Image: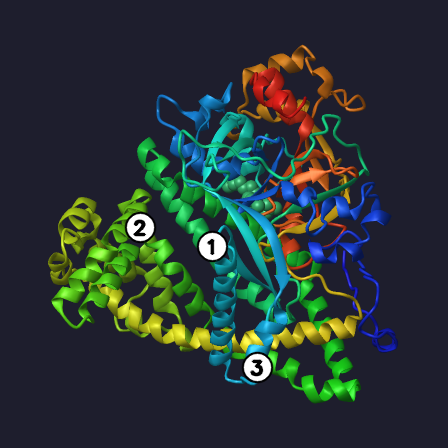
Amino acid sequence: MKFIHHTTIALALLLSATNIPYANANPDEGMYPLSELNRAGLKKAGLKISEKDIYNPGQVGLVDALVQVSGCTGSFVSNRGLIITNHHCAFSAVQLASTAINNYLKNGFVAQNQEQEIEAKGLKIRITDSYEDVSVKILNSVANISDPVERINTIKRKQEELVKQAEKEDPTIKAEVSEMFIGKSYVLFRYKTIEDVRLVYIPRQNIGEFGGETDNWVWPRHTGDYSFLRAYVGKDGKSAPYSKDNVPYQPKKHLKVNPNGVKENDFTFILGYPGKTFRHRPAQYIKYQQDYLLPYVSNLYDFQNKQMEEAGKDNTDIALSLATRIKRNANVLKNYRGKLKGLRGIDLLSTKKQEDEALAAFILSKPELKGKYGNLLNDIAAYYQVSDQDALKELWINNIYNSTSLLKVARDLNTLKVAMGKERSSHAAKQLFDYNVEQLKKSIQETYESYNKQADQRIFGRMLADAAAFQGKNQLESIQKLQLNGETANTYATQLINSSKLADQNYILNTVLANANALSQFDDKLLSFQNELDNDIVIFAAEQKRREGVLNKLMGDYVAVKEIFQAKNFIPDANSTLRLTYGHIKGYAPADATYMKPFTTIEGIIQKGNLGLSDFDYPQEIKTAYLNKNFGPYLKKDLGSVPVNILYDMDTTGGNSGSPIMNANGELIGVNFDRAYDATINDFAWNESYSRSIGVDIRYVLWVADKIDNAHFILKEMGI
Ligand code: ARG
Ligand code: ASP
């Protein structure tokens, strides 16, 4: 399957750049900013309510029911601050609340009343309050600046200035300026935050994580990836830290849950906070991903996970301490492998090259564009030609500290130690120490929590061996000097770690960080190693900054001219700001001779369970209810069962997890949580043939809550 949708030059010449209705070759593609809803074609696609019911500046709309939950999305489903999101979005908070005796992660947690709800540590909630286009202000500030570093610094300074000003005008909000199109358009967002979040209802792990890594990024899927939280505020209605006296937050709007769900081909839409996509990038960017980033990171994470799994295989405590790292790695790793498969499958690189060639020809054909953008594509090619030369070095630098825990500890200690050394007096150095030591201890402690010596040594050895093998511009002087090879790198890593005191957590936290003097005098081989390495990194960081400035300008021009060329209004890439996407409940054919239906059922849980894999363990209660056909009102008659997960062609990415899926009337019928394997490539290119996302059907949520978990308190609150 190939997708070519570049407009022919002749057609583009006929159309003027402005006032053209949105004409997308992919009708269901697009993560629309709310300001663009009027050209999304929602009504034509099947929306039954008015666009103003969704978003109406100054008035209340569905968007007021949306929340951002620490990197995920969620939505209010009652007027008492009840929130529905994913199980995997609350995972870390559930883990923190769990003990061996009260293992909520494993057994789930159901509050039967508000008093029983427990603190969800670490979860923060944000609500989008309002926003405003500030592109002119930002771009005016750099109109006469051509030096790339100064340009990028000025843009950043201007962004900060606007943020400060907005927060001063209204101290109850947090502001953020988001780059909508790199180097081209900027929007100021005002957010309200909620600090007191509580766990209300968490399904047990073999429902909420059913399928585990085996089924991650896979359709057909049967995961009950949902959870319920509640937002609390102070009695005065203002955001406040956790306190027994806080009261449930009253949202301006909450979503109505429709227990009847959806059927195939129904119109649906999603509001949420998609993280990052890279669709408006030139061919060289795709080549960089395909040749460098995706293979490098996926291979590294694969290696890391093997070492961590090996380290924890006979020891539950070690396994637990490494579980979150392994889970995150596994999620990214599988996503990147999916992308690599997809890039090859659709040969996106060739398509992008053709697009860029046509764009170049278009620029040359128009005198007014030729003057301004005549060199653009050559400049882009030249940029990547240079940056590809040390791409491996950059990836290595970006990954070294997350790969080697003790080296990260060394870096954190050195940062303070070096800064203290630069102070004019020992008194000033001591002050600096006192000011920073608690924060430093906290971050070091966090690193130690997932530290394992055996895994650390092996991963460090591999990183050193990798760097030692680098050629040309990829070489790092500090590593070259050691003259290591594949074998000696491992020995070197092992010896360095063995000779270091950094593995002794107690000693570092209580002796080295006992006072300023102790830190100033602390010497360690790993610290010296990190110091040397840091010289290389600092030099490279300056070059990275310069490149960021160059790229910012090039990409701004690229998007601007491409918009003229394609004579259609671009939808900006995702950037963690609130977006709407719509589509339909739809199956697909991911491989020769296959067709995947858009609903899975309870029967599928039983079938997978029969495989005997631990990822597919499920509660006996599900089997019993299934055998007794105890489906209640949640039965979908044509399936003869309760629908578990649903598939649709909406445009989603990471960050959309937990987003409410709504029907044509704006009622909640499911919760988004994943994509099918082939849709991992969405981040570079969306296509109707392979882009499918996965959600949990609300009927499954309600069925489990009702028949398996007796969570009647929540059902009643949602009006079920
Ligand atoms: N793939 C989904 C997402 O990107 C679900 C992740 C849940 N985590 C996991 N490792 N299975 O977040
Ligand atoms: N699982 C992802 C998330 O957590 C969603 C996705 O990447 O499709 O946001």
Quarter of the picture containing the C terminus is top right
Q: Helix, strand or loop at disc 1?
A: helix
Relative side of 648 to 550, left or right: right
Q: Amino acid at mark 1?
A: Asn
The answer to whether the residue labelled 1 contacts the one labelled 3, judged by CB atoms less than 8 Å apart, is no
Dot label at residue 382:
3
Q: Helix, strand or loop at disc 3?
A: helix
Relative side of 497 to 162, left or right: left
**Residue at the spot x=64%, y=23% of the render?**
702
* Tag in front: 1 or 3: 3
Q: Position of residue 296 (x, y in %)?
A: 48, 60
Q: Amino acid at mark 2?
A: Ser
Dot label at residue 443:
2
The answer to whether the residue labelled 3 contacts the one labelled 2, judged by CB atoms less than 8 Å apart, is no
- Mark 1 beta carbon near ligand 1 (under 8 Å): no
Badge 3 crowding class, 10 Å Cα cut-off, few under 14, some 14 to 19, many 20 or more, is few
Dot label at residue 299:
1
Q: Helix, strand or loop at disc 2?
A: helix
Badge 2 crowding class, 10 Å Cα cut-off, few under 14, some 14 to 19, many 20 or more, is some
Q: Amino acid at mark 3?
A: Ala
Q: Position of residue 158 (x, y in %)?
A: 51, 71
Camera-nearest residue between 267 and 354: 267
Badge 1 crowding class, 10 Å Cα cut-off, few under 14, some 14 to 19, many 20 or more, is some
* Tag in front: 3 or 2: 2
